[in-house]
Amino acid sequence: MLHQLQPQSRRTAVLTAAATAGLLAVTALASGTPAQAVTYGTPTITLSASYLSGAVGATGDPVVTVTVAQSGADASALTVAASATSKSSVATTADVTVTGTGATRRLAVAARGRGYTDLTVKVTGLGGKTATKKLYYAASAAVKNAADTRYLTGSSDASAAVDVGDGYAVVADDESNVLRLYSRSASGAPVKSWDVNSALGASKEIDIEAATRVGNTIYWTGSLGNNKDGEYKADRNTVFTTTVSGSGASTSLTVGRSYKKLRDDLVAWDEANDDAYGFAAGTEDGEAPKQIDGFNVEGLEFAPGSTTTAYVGFRAPLAPPKAGAKALIVPVTNFDKVLGSGTKAAFGTPIELDLGGLTIRDLRKNAAGQYLILAGSWAADDNSDPYALYSWDGVAGHAPVKRLDLPTTDPGGWEAIVDVPDLTASGARVQVITDSGAADLYGDGQEAKDLDHAEWKKSRSVWFTLGG
């Protein structure tokens, strides 16, 4: 009898267990509470900059890094997009592109028109939770040569530039005593910067206008002239050196020696030579530097084959000071000692160049001794006067050759040559930078140098192909 009842007992046990499991499942469903509930926090969103500048039709405009997170969620599950714009004629939400995955994204804006707009950037997380940040965007107008144009942000008054290899250059600003390291191929903020005020004992702007490099030494010079109101400012007489270590994005600069009497030496030399160029008159109190008979230095380069004789190129005066006259270069024959030990400057025979009535805005040479001159007006009107590039062999008495007229319809005056290519090569290209400090970039009547936010200040660098 026992043997016949065993299968029935087993069936009873199985049914009893199933009934118990079903009861438990029904009980869990009725309570509506999972065994382990998931909750999501409010997302967070951070922008690498709150202010961003772009340009209509630009290539490679600066971008903003967006960092997002949400507790309880993987960052890759979050979405980022522009949700609102205050002025759609400048940029709509559809003009904002966000790329990347995970916690870090890159946000770019393609400008529709010139002006300002406030963009709302929104992150949407799991559980439908969101957060927003404002991005304040400014767009400048389209320019010629847009595909070959990049923008150096953080400053608008670029005045001199020196290549430091691997696609980077150190750029000076004539409104501050800060040197900035920029990529030559990408728009955006400086990679590094060096404030040279304390090292040089300067309290006012040096008005850095020119530079040249020999080995690991970069020589920089102020304009040596009065300020725009004709006032004497001692710091503008500064010539100084920086020592370069490393290259490219790893470049470092150390301030070396300075000399603050080159203006005095030039005036004394000219007076001893019958006031041939009127330096004494051009530096008198009340005399603005950017006049046809003013006193203003904007070029510095060494003579052919020399590391001791430097060419000092003048924006003013013209020689003689009348329309159509020649540009002036004064050789300093002991420039190495002037900066090395503070020796009083000695001068060679001045050089006068026919640049079609223009003067020197920059003067650079390459390792082969080929010179390129950026020629412009002595006048302060930077945005409409003619500009041109001339090649030269650096020899007194040899005429420079015009290679290219530069466009003048876009904001900013051409101010700096980064380096000189092989001028004998077909299709040689040169990068030239503007000083855009006096430009109204965004159509609000405000000069770029006076903008409230550094990210909206910018100079423009353009690659040009030289003619024959």
Image (spheres, rainbow, N blue to C red):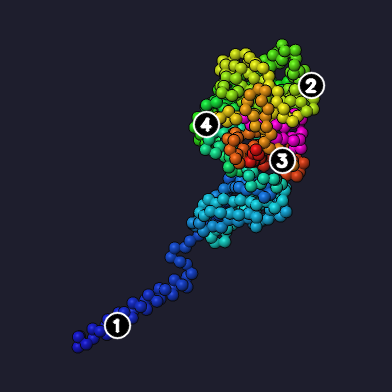
Instruction: Kindly report which numbered mark, 1 or 4, lies closer to the viewer in this rendering.
Output: 4
How far apart are labels 2 and 1 at the CA level? Answer: 115 Å
* Residue that mark 3 sits on: 407
Task: Please state the horizontal and vertical placement of residue 75, each as a whole percent of the image.
Answer: 51, 55
The secondary structure type at the circle numbered 4 is strand
Which type of secondary structure does the marked residue at label 3 adopt? Answer: loop
N-terminal label among 3 and 2: 2
Which circle, 4 or 3, is nearer the viewer? 3
User: Residue 158 colored magenta?
Assistant: no
- Give the residue pinned by disc 2: 286
Note whether residue 374 is visible: no
Q: Are marks 1 and 4 in contact (CB under 8 Å)?
A: no
Q: Earlier in the sequence, mark 1 or mark 3?
A: 1
The residue identified by callout 1 is: 11
Residue 227: image quadrant is: top right
Cα separation, mark 4 vs mark 3, equals: 34 Å
Q: Amino acid at mark 2?
A: Gly
Magenta segment range? Answer: 371-388
Disc 1 secondary structure class: helix
Query: Where is the C terminus found, in terms of image quarters?
Result: top right
Placement of 354 over or under 92, stated as above or below: above
Q: In this image, 253 relative to 283: left or right?
A: left
